[in-house]
Image (cartoon, rainbow, N blue to C red):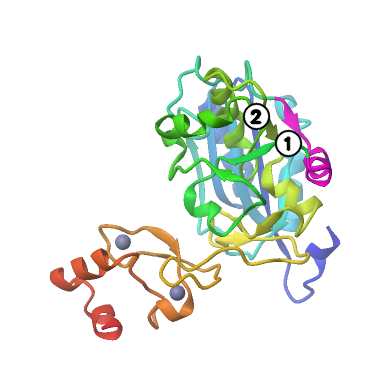
Amino acid sequence: MDALHSDTTAPAHQVLLFYRYTTVESPQELADHVRTLAATHALKGRVIVAHEGINATLEGTIDDTEAFADEFKKDERFTDIDIKRSRGTGGSFRDLSVKVRDELVSTGFTQEEADPRVRTAPKLTAEELRSWYESQRDFVVVDMRNDYEFASGRFEHSVEAGISAARHLPLVVHKLEPLKNKTIVTVCTGGVRCEKMSAYLQHKGFEHVYQLDGGIHTYMEKFPGKDFKGTLYTFDERITMHFGGEREVVGTCRLCDTKCETYVNCANEWCHLHFLACAGCTDERERAFCSSECREACAVAGSSPLLNQTSL
Ligand SMILES: [Zn+2]
Ligand SMILES: [Zn+2]
């Protein structure tokens, strides 16, 4: 935590990340309570509340976030909740959004297919996974995050699920069939997605499934630069983050293959693909097209005159 206090010129900010699958009788009531509590401490961020629990990312000054955490934990459902902390910028979120939804992560799974409150894969701690890497145990890490997240950082020898959204897992699960008899460790950013994804794999007959406890966030914090290479994608204005240590860039520009960690959205507004593009492949306004098709589509439509001029 000392590193977080190192900036003496301005109050240091941090981002809290936490979730809990537990039955919430009145999601609206919990959402109202969390909104009031977060607003009282001037926090910004995203909170989803559902009948199945809560998932949150919130930023504020260290004092405000810690005061929020203390008060939030007074609710006995969340007394022992694992709250992850990372360095903030003070501008990671533009506002505070607390919403009630059907699911914490939009998977579209039925309760029978995946309900972490009833059944989910056993949890493997960061220390256990580290020792598995060290002893070169026979296992496969399956990354359950979206494809663009995998692009800038991933575990060594990991397999990506190959999805662009959580609800797409049923469409690609057949590709994981060859791993059915292998020992699988599912990973995601903070763990909330794996609770469902690993349960879904179990439902589909995968027998040796574990999920990484606390997700990649916890692993990188405990073992910076080890096994997980590159940066961790975040769904806020920071875009990516890391915890120091020796760091290797694993991301590559989609257009020219140079090593890079900068994300852009395709300048074709009908495409808007989120991808890695190096400085050489973007214009002075940091824009790029994901493909020649998108570049041509815009040249024909004339929707991006500036980019067409500078890029031709
Ligand atoms: Zn490039
Ligand atoms: Zn495109």
Quarter assignment of residue 245: bottom right
**Local secondary structure at mark 1:** loop
Mark before the other along the chain sequence, 2 or 1: 1
Q: Does residue 86 appear left or right of residue 301 in this picture?
A: right
Q: Residue at x 77, y 66 (%)?
A: 246
Task: Give the image quarter of residue 168.
Answer: top left
Classed neighbour count for the residue bearing mark 2: other residues with Cα under 10 Å, few (<14), some (14–19), many (≥20): some
Task: Kindly report the distance in space between the C-alpha atoms of the residues bearing marks 2 and 1.
Answer: 8 Å
**Secondary-structure class at tag 2:** loop
Q: In which quarter of the image is residue 304?
A: bottom left
Find out whether the residues at labels 2 and 1 contact each other: C-beta distance under 8 Å.
Answer: yes
Which amino acid, mark 1?
Answer: Asp
Which kind of residue does numbered mark 2 sit on? Lys
The tally of labels here is: 2
**For ligand 2, which image quadrant applies?**
bottom left
- Where is residue 4 shown, x and y percent of the image? 78, 63
Q: Residue at x 41, y 59 (%)?
A: 274
Residue 128 part of the magenta-drawn span: yes
In depth, the one of 70 and 283 nearer the eye is 283
Q: Give the range drawn in magenta.
A: 122-136
Residue named by callout 1: 138
* In the depicted structure, whether residue 228 falls above or below residue 300: above
Q: Position of residue 182 (x, y in %)?
A: 65, 29
Q: What residue is disc 2 on?
A: 182
